[in-house]
Every structure is written in C-alpha cells, then in structure tokens.
Image (spheres, helix red, strand yellow):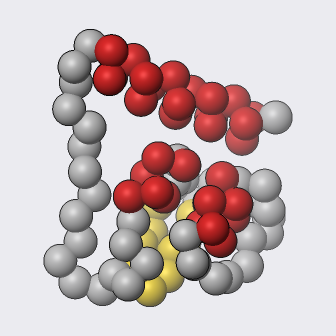
Amino acid sequence: MQARANDVYDVGRRVMGLLIGEAEQQITLIEPVILVATDLSPSDTAQLDPAMVKGIILEQGGEYVAFCYFGSLAGYSGRCRS
C-alpha cells in the first residue's frame, strides 16, 4: 500500500504544480547511463528516454514499484523483485 500512496502523492504533486504555474523539472540525459536512485516516480519514469537509459537500479520498491509497470510500458526490460 505504501507504494500506491507514493504514486498518489506524485500525481497530487504534479497537479498542484500545474495549478500554481510551477515549471516541471525535466530529466535530460546527454549520454547513455545506468540510472541509480532511491525510488523513481511514475512521472519521472515517463520522462526517461529508453535509448539513453541502459539500466535502472532502485534502492526502494519491489515487484510492485511503479517502475515495473510504467517502465515495461515504455520499453524497458528487466526484473522487478524485492
């Protein structure tokens, strides 16, 4: 349930930013990378260019983390497990 709460928080954060006119931070990669992060929100995952991200390592999450769902839709392959 905590993973879903984080996803709802991410959506709320994005909506609030749009309502108050806050510019979204963009993820721009200039060379291929292996991305290492504590966690990755659905909105962050949606911004990634699959041609530039060769791998992703997340400290938090498990098989139900948002990346496992949204990452596979964006063309990333890999294993998601606890």
Point 26% across, 13% down: residue = 20
Q: Is residue 52 left or right of residue 77?
A: left
The image position of residue 21, as x and y in percent, is 22, 19
Q: Give the position of the C terminus as an image quadrant.
A: bottom right
Left or right? Give the position of 73 relative to 30: right
Report whether 57 appears left or right of 50.
right
User: In the image, residue 40 lies at what x, y percent?
Assistant: 51, 53
Q: Is residue 49 above or below residue 21?
A: below
In terms of image quadrants, where is residue 8?
top right
For the N terminus, which image quadrant? Answer: top right
- Relative vertical location of residue 29 with respect to residue 64 in this rendering, above or below: below
Q: Is residue 64 visible?
A: yes
Could one spot residue 61 in this view of the protein? Answer: no
Residue at x-position 72% and y-position 41%: 3
- Residue displayed at 73% across by 36% down: 4
Q: Nearer the viewer, residue 82 or 24?
A: 24
Which quarter of the figure has residue 27? bottom left
Residue 11 position (above or below residue 72):
above
| Image coords of residue 70 (percent x, y) | 62, 60
- Count of marks placed on residues: 0
* Residue 28 picture location, percent across and down: 22, 64
